[in-house]
Amino acid sequence: MTRKGICYILSLIAYFGMPIGVLFIRSAEPYIMGLPFLLFWMVLWILLGSALMMIVHRLNPDVHEEVE
């Protein structure tokens, strides 16, 4: 698999992580770190999405091309 393919897959994971997970949450009852589970899930995916986009930026071969 090429670097560009990995970038596409990581971008899709970051894009669909939050909305797909929200579909499977049935209640806000369990609390994690003082937050209702739904709010915790959204904050988690905001942080994970940012981290994944940083990895995509580092792996993207187009970023590393020299501009003359």
Image (spheres, rainbow, N blue to C red):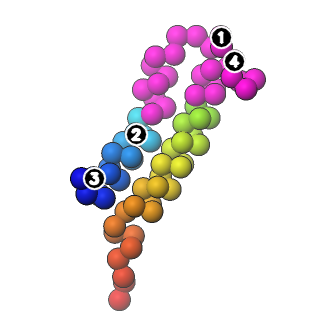
Badge 2 density bin: few <14, some 14–19, many ≥20, Cα 10 Å: some
Spatial distance from mark 1 to mark 2, Cα to Cα? 26 Å
Mark number, residue 13: 2
Magenta span: 17-41
| Among the two numbered marks 3 and 1 on one chain, the one whose residue lies closer to the N terminus | 3
Q: Which residue is mark 4?
A: 31
Kind of residue at badge 1? Glu
Kind of residue at badge 2? Ile
The reply to whether discs 2 and 3 touch (Cβ–Cβ < 8 Å) is no
| Among the two numbered marks 2 and 3 on one chain, the one whose residue lies closer to the N terminus | 3
Kind of residue at badge 4? Tyr
Whether 21 is drawn above or below 13: the answer is above
List the single residue furthest toward the front.
Answer: 1
Badge 3 density bin: few <14, some 14–19, many ≥20, Cα 10 Å: few
The answer to whether 53 appears left or right of 12 in the picture is: right
Spatial distance from mark 3 to mark 4, Cα to Cα? 37 Å
List the single residue furthest toward the left.
Answer: 1
Helix, strand or loop for disc 4? strand
The reply to whether discs 3 and 4 touch (Cβ–Cβ < 8 Å) is no
**Residue 39 in magenta?**
yes
The answer to whether 46 appears left or right of 10 in the picture is: right
List the single residue furthest toward the bottom.
Answer: 68
Q: Which residue is mark 1?
A: 29
Spatial distance from mark 3 to mark 1, Cα to Cα? 38 Å
List the single residue furthest toward the right.
Answer: 34
Q: Which residue is mark 3?
A: 5
